[in-house]
Amino acid sequence: MKILAKNKKAYNEYHILEILEAGIVLTGQEVKSIKTGKANMLGSFVVLKGEIPQLLNTKIPAYQPKNAPADYDEAGTRNLLLTKAEIKRLLGKSKQKSLTIVPLRMYTKQSKIKVEIAVVEKRDKKDKREIMKKRISDRDIRRELKTRG
C-alpha cells in the first residue's frame, strides 16, 4: 500500500470518530497524475448529494496539461464508491450537528486508488494546544533516548 496524498491538516484540526475506505471514480489522466504524486487534499471534504457521496476540493492537475480536455477542472467533484450500508451510516452521521466527513489520505490497494474518509468533529483551540504540547514532549523524549542509547 503506497500513500499517494495525505490531508495532514485534518489530523490536527479534527477529532476522528470513524474511518471508512472508499473507491473513487477517476479518468485515466487523473490516475496517472495521482500516481506521480500531484494530488493535493488540503481543504477537501465529502458531501452526500442524494445518496451519492462526492469528494470536493481535491486538486488533481492534468497529467499532461497540453493534452487535457478544454473543460478539465482540477478541483472538480468526484464520486466516491461505497456500499449502501456505508452510505446510510454516513447519511445518519452527516445529519448530526457538528459532524463532518473529510478525506484523510489517498493510496493504492491492489492497483486501485482508494480514499480513506473519516467522520470527524472539530477540535477546540485548547485541545489543539494540548496535542501540540504532547507531540513536542514525545519528540524530546525520543531524542533523549536516542542520544543515550
Image (cartoon, helix red, strand yellow):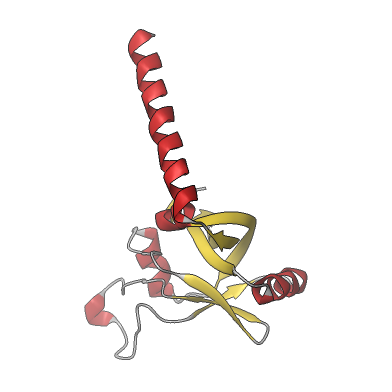
Q: Quadrant of residue 9?
A: bottom left
Judged from this view, the residue extending furthest toward the right is 85
Image position of 95 with respect to 12: above or below: below
Q: Quadrant of the C terminus?
A: top left
Q: Is residue 22 left or right of residue 92?
A: left
- State how many labels appear: 0
Residue 106 visible (yes or no): no
Residue 36's place in the image compared with 131, above or below, is: below
* Whole-percent x, y for residue 47 in the image: 56, 78
* Nearer to me, 110 or 95: 95
Find residue 73 and report its horizontal and vertical position in percent. Answer: 35, 83
Residue that protrudes farthest toward the front in the picture: 126
Q: Residue at x 42, y 46 (%)?
A: 129
Q: Is residue 107 left or right of residue 99?
A: left
- Vertical order, 39 against 108 (above or below): below
Instruction: Give the residue displayed 50% in from the left and 58% down from the top.
Output: 104
Q: Is residue 132 visible?
A: yes
Give whichever of 119, 32 is nearer the camera: 119
Q: Residue at x 77, y 70 (%)?
A: 85
Residue 61: percent from left, percent from top: 31, 72
Which residue is rendered at x = 43% and y = 74% of the image?
28
Please say if 8 is above or below 139: below
Q: In the image as oriented, which residue stretches furthest toward the top?
A: 148
Q: Position of residue 35 (x, y in %)?
A: 39, 59
Residue furthest bottom as drawn: 71
Q: Quadrant of residue 95?
A: bottom right
